[in-house]
Structures are given as C-alpha cells and as structure tokens.
Image (cartoon, rainbow, N blue to C red):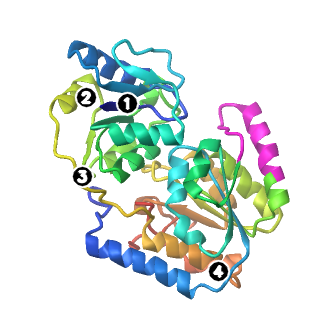
Amino acid sequence: MIFVTVGTELPFDRLVKMVDDWGARNARSDVFAQIGAGAYLPKASGYARFLDSQAFAAHLESATVVVSHAGTGSILSALAKAKRLIIVPRRASLGEHRNEHQLATVQHLGTITGIKVAHDETELVAQLENPWDAVTKPIFSPYASISLIEAIREFTSPGKNNSSAAQTVAHNPSAP
Amino acid sequence: MFRNVIPQIPTSSRLDIRAAVARIRQAGTVRTQRLLAISSGGGHWIEMLRLQPAFEGFDVTYATVGESYRCQVDDAKFCTIPNANSSDKWALIVSAVHVLWLVLTLRPAVVVSTGAAPGYLAIFFGRWIGAKTIWVDSIANAEELSLSGRLAGRLADLWLTQWPHLSRLEGPVYRGSIL
C-alpha cells in the first residue's frame, strides 16, 4: 500500500493530487491518503482527513512506500518502521506553510538512508516508479543521542542551580 | 556541507546506548520532583518521546494536544491542552489559560518542551513558579530557529538546538539531537 500523509497541522493538496493523479493514470488501487483539512478529495485513492495514533501506526505498518510532507513526525515514524520514504517539502512560496523550513528539512535529513526527496511531480513519479531497496531494520535507536539525554539529566539534577547548570552545558559546536 | 552530520548507529553502539540508559537508572538518586513534558502534536510529540530516558526518576506529566497520544506513554500521567499557533490569537489565548492552569496546579520543578506555542507558554508560566525550563528546538528547524524557538529560548534556562551550525554563544547550545 502506498501511504500518503500530510500531517496534523496543515493541508497539502498539491501532494495529495500528485499521488492521486499518478494512481489514476496507473490504475492503482492501493493508495491511501491522510489528507488533513485539504480541499482536494482524491478520486483514485482511499482517504481520511485525520488518523489517530493507532490508525496511523496501522497504515504505516501496511505501507510499502510512505509519501509524506517533510514533517518531523512522519519522517521519524517511517524511519522507526524502516519504511521506504519519499518526502515532499511544503513551499511557503506556494502558500503551503508559514516559512520554508521544510526545504531546509529535506536538505539536511534527505540524505538519510531510505529517504528520497521529491520537489515536484516529475521527481515524485520517478521515485514512485523506481523502487529502491528498503533498509532491513531501523537505523536509529528509539531514543535521542546519549549526549542530549545526559545534557538534560545534568541540567535537571537536584542541587544544580540554573546559572551554574547552564554554564556546564556551554556552547560546544564540536559535541557529538 | 552538512551531509552525513547525523550518524547512523551501528549495532554495537545501540548496545552502548542501552547500557548507558541502564547506568543512568542505577546511578540517579531517587527524585520525586515533578516534571512537565509539554509539546504540540505530530513531530514535536515524537521528539519528546525520544527524550524519555532524560526524565527517569522524575514524576512526569506529559501534556500534548490530542487524547490519542496517551497510549504512547503507557501509564504515565497525561493530559491534553488546546493547540495553538501564532496565526490564531484567540486559540493562543485559550491555550494560554489552560497551560497556566496546568502549571499552577501541577507546580513542576522542571518544564521541558520540544515546541511549539503551548511549550512556549508553559516555559513562560513555569518561570513564574521558579521551575527550571528547557526548550529543545525541533530538528525540523535545520537552517534557522522557529518563532516560538526564538521567543522561548530567551526565557528558557536551557536553550537547545539540534543542529551544531545553529549553536551560538548566547544560545541556543548544541548537545546532540533526537536522532
């Protein structure tokens, strides 16, 4: 099943329509889209506006490919299940978001193994029609990096007042 | 320039991570201080879940914007707060009232947020009651901080970014990421 998700905050009609049009052209019956508050209703795909966390997990489990907006939640969820993932950034220039941070997200996270990036319909169709090998298992642990966890632990230790604790977590661009 | 900045963790290092979490559990003194972990939904919430080992030993209350997230924190305390963002002032006011009530009744010693606006409100009000406040800027903000991140960072006692190139002397600091 090809699982399309636009996230919980904003619609993303351009993404839903691109995949729906592709599904219609190729007579696909295995496309499902979570469309949010979108105005575009898919013609060739099953859809729901919102999925609670259990329903989202169930669709994720059945998916062979996830096509998602470039939102952290969707990306992390797909990575945790080692799913093939195509991320499509929302563009502020097209009125799809308040700023262009999704462009930055795809630049910085788009090189992770198992993730493909598509900016437009041509790139998206190319990814959909040329499946790549999925990773066999999640490549990240279920938790944040040890250094981040320990920084928070150190800061919240009883007996550390706020100013001295903050100084021990100093500006350190070389930290892992 | 920033390709491969996020390392993939080999199996041996995943074992190290589990061992480190176990050491944290063993070494920590018993803490019964209350910690409020508050975030918006979606990615903000998932990033918060990945920080859970940092909250070991605290009496944690999770607060987010949807009841369906409750099952992801097992039996931990959980409550919902109305969502809000900068484009809807009335929703912001409603959310602020709820968050203020939560902070005043819970009286956490620590407030942690992974964003967005409800987290900023919790840090704002948390300072009134002397809580230690932590803002973890979303990994989604890879080129510049969000509005709520810039506002919250100036208030938070610990202001964190997940990208080394966004780290500044005056904050935020980089100490790792949720990946």
Indicate the chain on which mark 2 is placed.
A
Q: Earlier in the sequence, mark 1 or mark 2?
A: 1
Indicate the chain on which mark 3 is placed.
A
Task: State the SS at label 3.
Answer: loop
Residue A72: mark: none
Task: State the SS at label 2.
Answer: helix
Amino acid type at circle 2 is Leu
Question: Between marks 4 and 1, how big is the CA–CA gap?
Answer: 43 Å
Picture coordinates of residue A85, whole percent (x, y): 30, 41
The boundaries of the magenta stretch are: B80-101
Question: Between marks 1 and 2, how big is the CA–CA gap?
Answer: 12 Å
In front of the other: B9 or A80: A80
Do callouts 4 and 2 mark residues in contact (Cβ within 8 Å)?
A: no
Residue A124: mark: 2
Q: State which mark lies toward you, 1 or 2.
A: 1
Q: How many marks?
A: 4
Above-or-below relation of A104 to B91: below
Task: State the SS at label 1.
Answer: strand
Residue ID at (51%, 33%): A51
Q: In this figure, which residue is indicated by the disc labeled 3?
A: A113
Q: In this figure, which residue is indicated by the disc labeled 1?
A: A4
